[in-house]
Amino acid sequence: MQLENPYLDPLLAKEQVAASKFENVRTVLVVISSAGMVLDRESVRHKILATYSGAAVFFMTGSGGRLGPSAPKSVDLVIDLSAPGFRHKWFLALRLNSMARFTVGRDAGLFRARVYDRIYREGKRLTDVLVWERKVQREVFALAGIAFTPTSDVPADRAHEIALSLPPMARI
């Protein structure tokens, strides 16, 4: 019987994610999901740079449009967050696979399960789309070797308790 430890489980998960990291990645292309993004672009860029330091990060939409600077014709890693059932450009998965050394994504669309190097197969979708997207996008990033474990907890504000526990001030 394995007990869950709230302090050790994130560390073990981070080690497992680090084991799936790709080698020699200098350029990363992230395809944004039309269903919703849990993190903003700069947060995603920060998480990717924490894992693949010195990498150039580019973004594009599922319809093939660029967000920010345009990506080069060949990249090292493609992370496709496109959700199933949303508008995609025809044969986008084939084009992304031809321009990248490694491809990671969701099992959505025609060719992704056969074309991508690592695939996240989604189960039954939850009712709340953003909760579901948060779970799935973290799992896709984990397949790419990018960990989303929190580094520390924010302690509760104890200013009121501390002020009440201090002795009264002496009058001058």
Image (spheres, rainbow, N blue to C red):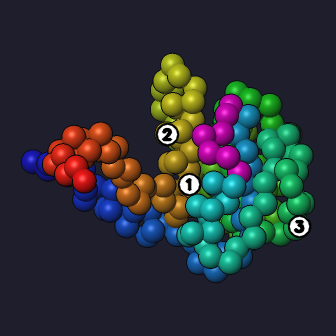
Q: Which residues are magenta?
A: 35-41
Counting residues from the start of the chain, the first of labels 2 and 3 encountered is: 3
Q: Which mark is residue 97?
A: none
Counting residues from the start of the chain, the first of labels 2 and 1 encountered is: 2
Question: Eyeballing the image, is 89 above or below 143?
Answer: above
Look at the numbered discs 1 and 3 and tell me whether their residues touch, using CB distance below 8 Å: no
Instruction: Give the secondary structure at mark 3.
Output: loop
The residue at 18%/46% (across/down) is: 168
Q: Is residue 13 left or right of residue 31?
A: left
Circle 2: residue type: Lys
The residue at 9%/48% (across/down) is: 1
The residue nearer to you, when weighing 36 against 140, is 36
The residue nearer to you, when weighing 156 against 58, is 156
Q: CA distance from mark 2 to mark 3?
A: 30 Å
Q: Which mark is residue 135?
A: 2
Question: Is residue 103 a member of the stretch shown in magenta?
Answer: no
The residue nearer to you, when weighing 145 against 55, is 55
The residue that disc 3 covers is 73
Q: CA distance from mark 1 to mark 3?
A: 22 Å
Question: Eyeballing the image, is 122 above or below 50?
Answer: above
The residue at 52%/31% (across/down) is: 132
Pointer 1: residues within 10 angstroms few (<14), some, or many (20+)?
Answer: many
- In the rendered image, the residue lying farthest to the front is 172
Question: Is residue 38 a member of the stretch shown in magenta?
Answer: yes
Q: CA distance from mark 2 to mark 1?
A: 10 Å
Pointer 3: residues within 10 angstroms few (<14), some, or many (20+)?
Answer: few
The residue that disc 1 covers is 141
